[in-house]
Image (cartoon, rainbow, N blue to C red):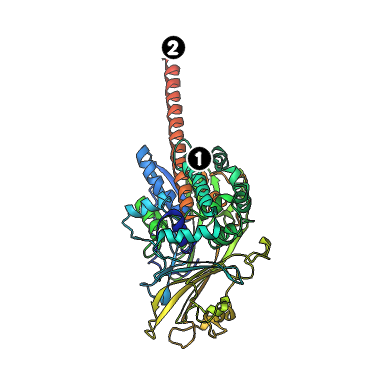
Amino acid sequence: MYAGWNLVLVGSVLCGQSLGFFWPFTAFAATNAINTTPGANYTGRRVAIIGAGAGGSSTAYYLQQFAERSGVEVDITVFERASYVGGRSTTVNAYGDPLEPVELGASIFVDVNTILKNSSEKFGLKAKSSETELDEVLGIWNGETFVYTQKDSGWYWWDITKLLWKYGLAPIRTQRLMKSTVAKFLKLYEAPFFPFRSLSDRALDLDLIPVTSLTGEQYLTNNSIGAPFSTDIIQASTRVNYGQNLAVIHALETMVCMAIDGAMQIAGGNWQIFDNMLKASNATTLLNSTVSAISKHGGKYNIKTSSKDAAGKLSTKEQPFDTIVLAAPFQYSDIDIEEGLVKRLPDKIPYVKLHVTLFASPKRLDPTFFGLKPDVETPTTILTTLAPDELPSAGVGKAGFFSISTLRPILNPKTLRKEYLYKVFSPKALTSEFLGGILGAPVPTNLTKISADGEDAISWFYPHVWNSYPVEHPRVTFEDSELARGFYYTSGMESFISTMETNALMGMNVAQLIVDDYLQVIEEEKAKKEKTEQQKVIDDDAITPDEL
C-alpha cells in the first residue's frame, strides 16, 4: 500500500479522526546466519521458506506457533537473496546517516491490519501516526490546476462541512461502501473461512467476486458514487497507492485504498516487524542466499542455493526439505522448478514499475510550477489525478507523477543548514529538468554527482525502482495457496489485495495449512503402523504348531 500519508487528511474527516500508503541498504546490520541444519537423527519436519518479506516472515512466525500448539516438531530455514529482511518494506538512510531512516517501500498500515498492529505491539515497537513532521497541506493536482486542497485545521466539523459542500453525499456513500466491502474481507481471518486452500473459492464464499470482477469506476458508479469525488479524491488514492486509474484497478483494491482509518508506521522502519517475526520463529535465516533450483527425490524436496562469502567467493549447496514455501512472486524468483513437480506454475502477470525518488533540498516546492501565484502557499503533499480531457489510458497523464511528499526538515551534515526531505512516486525516472521545475532552481544534469557539501538545489539524491505491485485488473480467479503437495505459495494474494498485511495474512494461512497437512500425515502414518501391527498379529496367529 501507499508509502506515505497524503489522503489521511481526507480519510480522517470521513472517519471522524484527526491525524498529524536487491540493494545496498543499511537499515540494519545484516549477516549470513549460521547454518543450524539438524543432524541425521532429526525426526521433525524440515520447512524451507523462500523470501524474508511480509509473507515469508509471517509464515515462519505463525508456523512455529501453530506447530508448537499442535505438538508438531518443525525446523524452519528462510532463504533470502537480499542482504536484509523485509522485502518491499525497507528503509534507506538519508545522507547515509542511520539516525535519518526513510521508508523506501511499503510505509503504512492501518487499524484493521490486525496482524501488523498486534505483532508490533507484542514486539514493543513504537508506532507513530505520520511520516510527515510538518503541518500538512494536501493538494490534488490534475496537471493543470488543483482540484482539491485541504489543511488539517483541527476542527472536524468545519473540515467535513467543506468536504460535503464540494462533493455532496459522495464521501459518506464511499465510507459506507468501503466499510461494508472490507467487512466481508475481514472474515478471511476467522473460521470457517480460515484457513483456505483456494483464494478463488473464498472470494466466492464471501461474495467478493462481484467486487474483484469490476473496475473501481464501475463499482462506484453502480453504488451512486461518481465524478467529481471519484476522479478527484478516490482516483488520487488509487494512483498514489497502486499507480493505477479507476478505470483500470479492480474495485476491491479501490476500496482498500479508502480504508485509511488509524494509519501508522513503525518508528525506524516497518521492516522491524518482519525481523522480529523471524527472530521469534527460531528459524535459521540465511541472507544473501539465492535459491536457484527446486527438485524432488525420494519423497523430499531438494533446494539448490548459491551464496557469496565476505570475500565474494561463490558457493553452492543442496539441501533436502519436507515442505517448500515460495513467499515471493514466482515470475521474479528466477527459480528453475523441475518439470512436472507442480500441478501448474503461477501465471506471469504485469507489475507496476514504480520509481521512488528521495532527495533533500533547501528549497520549498515552487508554486509557479503548479500554476499558482508566486506568493501562494504550495501544498506540502501533492497527489495527482487526470485532467478532464484525459482518458484513463493516459496513465499518469499530464501531471507526470503520482505524488510528491515533503516528509520533514532535515539537517545537512556537511553545511549544517536546514533542508527538506522529499519523496516522489512516478512511473519514470525523474529528470533534472523536472526537479529544477518543482524547486524553482537549476539542478545539475548529472544527478549521480550530487554532493551534500555543494551549493546545488539538491544535496542528497536516492532513486530506486520497484516491481511494486500487480496491475490490478478485474479478475475472478486467483492463484491457489498450494502448488503441489507440500509446496505452498503466498504471492497469489497480490492480485487480490497487495499490502503488507494481506501478504502476512497469506503467510499465516499457509502456516496453518502446513500444520494441518502434517497432522493428517501423522494420522495416516499412525493408521498405517496400526494396520501393519494388526496384520502381524494375524500372521502370527495363523502359524500352526507344526510350523513351530
Which one is nearer the viewer's eye here, 205 or 259? 259
Q: Nearer the viewer, residue 435 or 358?
A: 435
- The answer to whether residue 492 is seen in the rendering is yes
**In this rendering, would 131 be left or right of 299?**
left
* Residue found at x 38% / y 66%: 28
Foreground: 48 or 499? 499
Query: Could you tell me which residue is drawn at 56 percent across and 62 percent down?
Result: 236
Q: Position of residue 262 (x, y in %)?
A: 41, 55
Residue found farthest to the top = 545
Q: Position of residue 86 (x, y in %)?
A: 44, 59
| Quarter assignment of residue 529 | top left
Circle 2: element type: loop
- Position of residue 505 relative to residue 439, above or below, is above
Please tell me the numbered disc located at residue 544: 2
Asked if one can make out residue 282 in the rendered structure from this viewpoint, the answer is no
Specify which label sits upstream in the sequence, 1 or 2: 1
Query: Which residue is nearer to you in this view: 420 or 445?
Result: 420
Specify the farthest residue to the bottom: 455
Label 2 amino acid?
Thr
Disc 1 residue crowd, few under 14, some 14–19, many 20+, Cα 10 Å? many
Number of marks present in the image shown: 2
**Horizontally, is 139 left or right of 130 in the view?**
right
- The percent position of residue 470, horizontal first and vertical second, equals 58, 56
In the rendered structure, find residue 239 and report the number of the disc placed on it.
Answer: none
- Could you tell whether 438 is left or right of 409 in the image? right
Q: Real-space Cα distance between discs 1 and 2?
A: 54 Å
Task: Using a 10 Å C-alpha cutoff, classify the residue at mark 2 as few (fewer than 14 neighbours), some (14 to 19) or many (20 or more).
Answer: few
Q: Position of residue 391 (x, y in %)?
A: 68, 62
Question: What secondary structure is marked by label 1?
Answer: loop
Residue located beneath label 1 in the image: 196
Asked if 146 appears above or below 109 in the picture, the reply is below
